[in-house]
Amino acid sequence: MPKKKLKKSHEPSDEKLCRLCSFSYDDEAIYGKLIENNGERYHYFCLLFACGLPQQGEDTEGIFGFLPEDIKKEISRATRLKCSFCKRYTAASACALKECRTKYHVPCALQQNSVLFHYYDSFESYCVKHRDEFGPKIDDRYNKIDDEQCFICLEKFVDQENNENNENLKYQVLLTSCCSKFLHINCVKRQCFNAGIHFTRCPLCNDRDNFIECVQIHGVFLPDEDAKWEQNENAWRDQESRYEHCDAIKCKCPFNDGRNYVGEDDSEWAINICCTCGSYGVHTGCLIDETIDLETFECPDCLQLSSKLSITFDSSSDDSVQIISEQVNNLSASNAQLKICEQNEMLEKLQNQKHCNHAKEIHQNNNNNHEIDYHINSSLNISQMKESIDSQIRDQFKANGQMT
């Protein structure tokens, strides 16, 4: 009688396969990182849930504490164990209950969505027959999700067009304990993988503690590391740059770079940045008020906003009324100075044009006879002031018959 041949784990392939499961899946959020060590590959989750593989080394030894000699012994043991799903060998993982004989590859179990994996404490897993004893409680609400959708991917849990209703659907969704909403398990896995344990929050109510406990019970891996967006090599590049431009109405800098010239600290042509928004700068020598404290310097927009916020939050106090009044007066004076400088700059441009004589006459009339009323309301912004000046200058041109 011919001897029965053992079925190989998988057909030969040129790809480098995981030595424990013989799969080459490279989806770190679902199957764990595919680690290459000494020319061989291993899924991180396959190492974690291999029943006979101890983690005897330090984190810096072997593969996160899994020593090479221990891994070889586990591979040798798993060659005699058959997976309950794909019916192939090298099934190193099994149900944590000793009386249960269910064996499986970690990727096979994850694809079937029937095995519960606990990524904490002893890293135990439970087959579909025993998972309800150690996992989340399944109640009647799980039977009423046909028309509901995941709030992360916005797709429905049941495909109505194809009438697909998987019998394991209740194991593919997660019911949040913080706000009682359903989410896809795989959607939550990817969110937690990218956010890490320190930034994981419920995407709906922003709860942290209850949500983390909930996802762990449902079998979601939370990497103990910073969020992926903070691990990027250029993650903090924007914070290393500084605003370097003079936004004064009239820049007095004599250098060729003009507004873009940046002098040394404490020099006349050093750029002072708004301490509130950080997106407005002005040379020290271009400041209208030389007595301004450079450490608390604020741009006109932020200064105006600060005065409004003070009115909103402190208007009930008698002392605050006086402070607010002073702030509004200072703001009005500052805006008036800006407006005067802007008009003078516009008049200087007119002097270089064909009608410079009329511009001089307008300038003289403004100073002697027809002085423009610059009563500034603190609620006006700088753009409104500019429109008002333009309008008054056009009226002067019309009065002299020089409007083109």
Image (tube, rainbow, N blue to C red):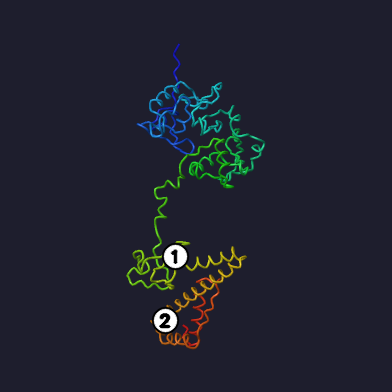
Query: Which residue was labeled with disc 2?
Result: 350
Q: Residues within 10 Å of mark 2 (few under 14, many from 20)?
A: some
Q: Height in image: 286 above or below 231?
A: below
Q: Are marks 1 and 2 in contact (CB under 8 Å)?
A: no
Q: Rounded to the nearest whole Å, what is the CA distance between mark 1 and mark 2?
A: 28 Å
As drawn, the residue found furthest toward the front would be: 319
SS category of the residue bearing label 2: helix
**Amino acid type, callout 2:** Leu
Sooner in the amino-acid sequence: mark 1 or mark 2: 1
**Amino acid type, callout 1:** Tyr
Residue in the foreground of this view, choosing between 266 and 40: 266
Quarter of the figure with residue 346? bottom left
Give coordinates of residue 13: x percent, y percent: 40, 30
Quarter of the figure with residue 308? bottom right
SS category of the residue bearing label 1: loop
Identified at 56% across, 65% down, the residue is 310
Mark carried by residue 280: 1
Identified at 52% across, 30% down, the residue is 109
Give coordinates of residue 166: x percent, y percent: 60, 34
Q: Height in image: 145 above or below 41?
A: below
Residue in the foreground of this view, choosing between 98 and 17: 98
Give coordinates of residue 40: x percent, y percent: 37, 31
Quadrant in which the N terminus is drawn: top left
Give coordinates of residue 17: x percent, y percent: 41, 31
- Image side of residue 253 versus residue 95, left or right: left
As drawn, the residue found furthest toward the right would be: 140
Identified at 52% across, 77% down, the residue is 388
Q: Height in image: 313 above or below 252?
A: above
